[in-house]
Image (cartoon, rainbow, N blue to C red):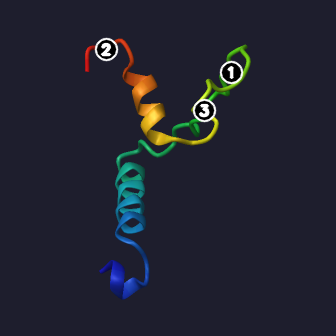
Amino acid sequence: MADREGTSLRALVEAGLRETLKARGEGGLPPFHLHLVTFAGDGLQPGVAEGAWDRIRDLAYEGRGA
């Protein structure tokens, strides 16, 4: 059906979910807004600013026994 309508499966599922929620009367919720949260500091740690994903993963799991 998505191919026939020239859209993606994701867009088709999202549209169906919106219609289902609207039919149940749950579509009138206010839109969700993600609040911006920032932290004070000196920026990214060394090795992260360069975008080395292996280093980012190592830092994320550092001290967690993995």
Tell which tag, 3 or 2, sits nearer the viewer. Answer: 2
The quadrant in which the C terminus is found is top left
> From the viewer's perspective, is residue 23 above or below residue 46?
below
Crowding at label 1, few (<14), some or many (≥20) Cα neighbours within 10 Å?
few
Q: How many marks?
A: 3
Q: Quadrant of residue 60?
A: top left
Amino acid residing under circle 1 = Thr
- Report the residue marked by disc 1: 38
Crowding at label 2, few (<14), some or many (≥20) Cα neighbours within 10 Å?
few
Give the CA separation, mark 1 to mark 2.
Answer: 24 Å
> From the viewer's perspective, is residue 4 above or below residue 12?
below
Task: Assess whether mark 2 and mark 1 are in contact (beta carbons under 8 angstroms).
Answer: no
Q: Quadrant of residue 58?
A: top left
Q: Secondary structure at mark 2?
A: loop
- Report the residue marked by disc 2: 64
For the point 64% across and 36% down, the residue is 49
Amino acid residing under circle 2 = Arg
Tell which tag, 1 or 2, sits nearer the viewer. Answer: 2
Where residue 65 appears, x then y in whole percent? 26, 14
Give the CA separation, mark 3 to mark 2.
Answer: 29 Å
**Side of 34 where 56 appears, left or right:** left
Specify the label residue 34 is tagged with. 3
Specify the label residue 27 is tagged with. none
Amino acid residing under circle 3 = Leu
Viewer-closest of 38 and 11: 38
